Image: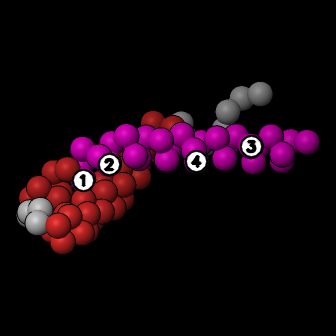
Amino acid sequence: MKRQGWSAAQIAFALYPLGAGAAAVNVFFASLIFSWVGGPIATTAWSIGLGCLIGVPATWYFALHIRRLMDVAEERQQT
């Protein structure tokens, strides 16, 4: 069976801006929650920077998940 569609790497590259943005927002909100116990609130630059770092593995694993779903859908379509 030949794989059709995008590879996991292509999916990850396409979705990385969304993954990094979502991670940056989560980092900022986590710092707000952490501030309730006396922690510092992350600046915009720190939130974006950490979001870019955290977004790489998060987007990669999400792309692998999407690729697996595409493979399952192709399998079911052929049977």
Image quarter (top left, top right, bottom left or bottom right) of the N terminus: top right
Q: CA distance from mark 4 to mark 2?
A: 16 Å
Q: CA distance from mark 1 to mark 2?
A: 6 Å
Tell which circle, 2 or 3, labels the residue nearer the N-terminal end. 2
Q: What residue does disc 2 label?
A: 55
Tag 3: Cα neighbours inside 10 Å, few (<14), some, or many (≥20)?
few
Rendering quarter of residue 9 = top left
Q: CA distance from mark 3 to mark 1?
A: 31 Å
Tell me the SS state at disc 2: helix
Q: What residue does disc 1 label?
A: 51
Magenta part of the chain:
51-79
Q: Is residue 45 above or below residue 54?
A: below
Tell which circle, 1 or 4, labels the residue nearer the N-terminal end. 1
Left or right: 62 as drawn, with respect to 42:
right
Residue 27 lies, in percent from the top left, at 24, 59
Residue 50 lies, in percent from the top left, at 20, 50
Q: Which residue corresponds to the image point at 40% horizontal and 46% vertical from the top-left?
A: 58
Q: What residue does disc 3 label?
A: 72
Tell me the SS state at disc 1: helix
The foreground one among 4 and 37 is 37
The foreground one among 77 and 27 is 27
- Which of labels 1 and 4 is toward the front? 1
- Which of labels 3 and 1 is toward the front? 1
The amino acid type of the residue labelled 4 equals: Ile
Tell which circle, 4 or 3, labels the residue nearer the N-terminal end. 4
Q: Which residue corresponds to the image point at 41% horizontal and 47% vertical from the top-left?
A: 59
Q: CA distance from mark 2 to mark 3?
A: 25 Å
The amino acid type of the residue labelled 1 equals: Gly
